[in-house]
Amino acid sequence: MKRVAEEFRGAELGDPRRAARLLKVAASMAEEPGASFPERLDEGELEGAYRFFSSVWVDLDAILAPHVAATWRRASQDDVTLALHDTTTISFRAQGAREGIPASSRGAQQFLAHATLAVCGDETRRPHGVLGLSTHLLEHDEDVHARWRKQVQAVAAHPDARAVVHVMDREADDYALLAFLLGGGHRFIIRAQYDRRLGERGSMRQALGLIPIADTRQVELSARVNRRGLSKQSRIHPPREARQTTLAFSATQIAIPRPPSAPADTPASLSLHVVRVWEVDPPEGEKPIEWLLLTSEPISTHGEILRVIDWYRARWVIEEFFKALKTGCAYEKRQLETFHALRNALALFAPLAWQLLLLRTEAQHRPRTPASVVLGEDHIAVLRAAGRRPLPPQPSTSDVLLAIAALGGHLRRNGEPGWLVLGRGLEKLEVLTAGWCLRKSSETSDQS
């Protein structure tokens, strides 16, 4: 990978030795994101890394700050940047006691990680990096929408936030949060969880049912596997076969009255736009696709409605980011003994997960981009010399992605490579590249 360790340069940790330690650990783990600390660090480095993560002078925000600044620099080139917000559950096995994290009823120790990922608003959905990251213990997570508000505020405080659209899933459907977004002039798209009542117009779904279909679109729905042991997720996102289907869409302006559960200091009603997307003729036995998207964005034309839909569809990129973090970087396997240390390690691995995601995104959406955008010269030389797939004279990002996946055991007939084989392939590539560079260094010394 490119020099992802540079994403941490300039971290203000109160002591230059701590900053140097961060760069050293980041550079080592960037070479094999899925490896354990003992596999990548020698005895002295390992002890130093554990001290670093456990230090009271080190925290998540300070470690991540240089990467956030770099993310803004990349995003500032966009006409529109999508700020994708979402929460994931970080889970550690019951074995071992991690100080500061309560155990669940099944013995596992869990906390929530809430992230904001910057993604280009065009069709490439190129990820620029993390704009915000916070952690929350489940037993203390009483106001679940407070974390959404805080990260919106943090993003909005940046001078380039004028071109940002906040994209959120159903958990963000909260009257007070909607009032906060509208009151602050923030641009947003939120998938509705509730079919709210609109007075004489009935519910949102009923009101939209009276609006003529604006248009239809043929789309390919990807397959969704059954997630064992995750009953809530399986209910929200049931398994399905891949299929081509027809989606219809319509849009209107609505006024949502304040529900009894909302704070009394919020407005009596909120005026916003809503877009409905639904599957016209779903297969028998399949749950039909339907979205109700609450938004501040204009909906006067078909193009504006489609833009809202496409920007919401980009939300899936943050799900891939979490997969890169958990599978590609093996974050949930980290052997650290305190919540504080794990938070600091999360700040280290989040930019590494972004780099993995960038590699795959470039290969998918800009497959002809030169491989040098995501890999160094030595990595490309090693793939050419020792890879299982031959590289052309001028390899593209797609070429090197498949070559790396092949090192991890991926067969082209199996379709797009997943995070597991990519992680394995990167590990092998880095080991081979380390030997390659050592040999080059030895040859240079012999000639001097």
Image (cartoon, rainbow, N blue to C red):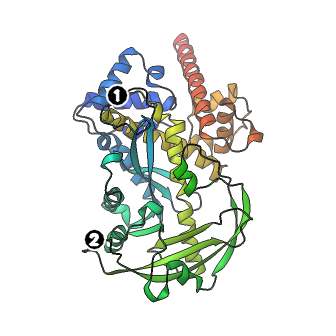
Q: Is residue 109 left or right of residue 366?
A: left
Query: Disc 1 vs disc 2: which is toward the camera?
Result: 2
Residue drawn at x 41%, y 32% is: 26
Q: Which residue is mark 1?
A: 337
Q: Which residue is mark 2?
A: 263
Tag 2 or tag 1, which sits nearer the N-term?
Answer: 2
Regarding residue 3, the answer to whether it shows in the image is yes
* Mark 1 touches mark 2? (CB < 8 Å): no
Q: Is residue 354 above or below residue 153?
A: above
Q: Is residue 189 above or below residue 396?
A: below
Q: Position of residue 374 (x, y in %)?
A: 56, 41
Residue drawn at x 31%, y 81% is: 268
**Residue closer to the observer: 257 or 183:** 257
- Secondary structure found at label 1: loop
Q: How many numbered discs, if any?
A: 2
Q: Work out which residue is located at the far top of the displayed protein and give it.
A: 446
For the residue carrying disc 2, how many other residues have a C-alpha within 10 Å: few (<14), some (14-19), or many (20+)?
few
At label 1, the amino acid type is: Glu
**Residue closer to the observer: 141 or 7:** 141
The quarter holding residue 153 reads bottom left
Regarding residue 1, the answer to whether it shows in the image is no
Q: Is residue 407 left or right of residue 376?
A: right
Residue drawn at x 54%, y 75% is: 275
- Secondary structure found at label 2: loop
Q: Is residue 177 left or right of residue 436?
A: left
Residue drawn at x 47%, y 51% is: 128
The quarter holding residue 217 reads bottom right
Q: CA distance from mark 1 to mark 2?
A: 40 Å
Q: Position of residue 353 (x, y in %)?
A: 49, 41
At label 2, the amino acid type is: Pro
For the residue carrying disc 1, how many other residues have a C-alpha within 10 Å: few (<14), some (14-19), or many (20+)?
some
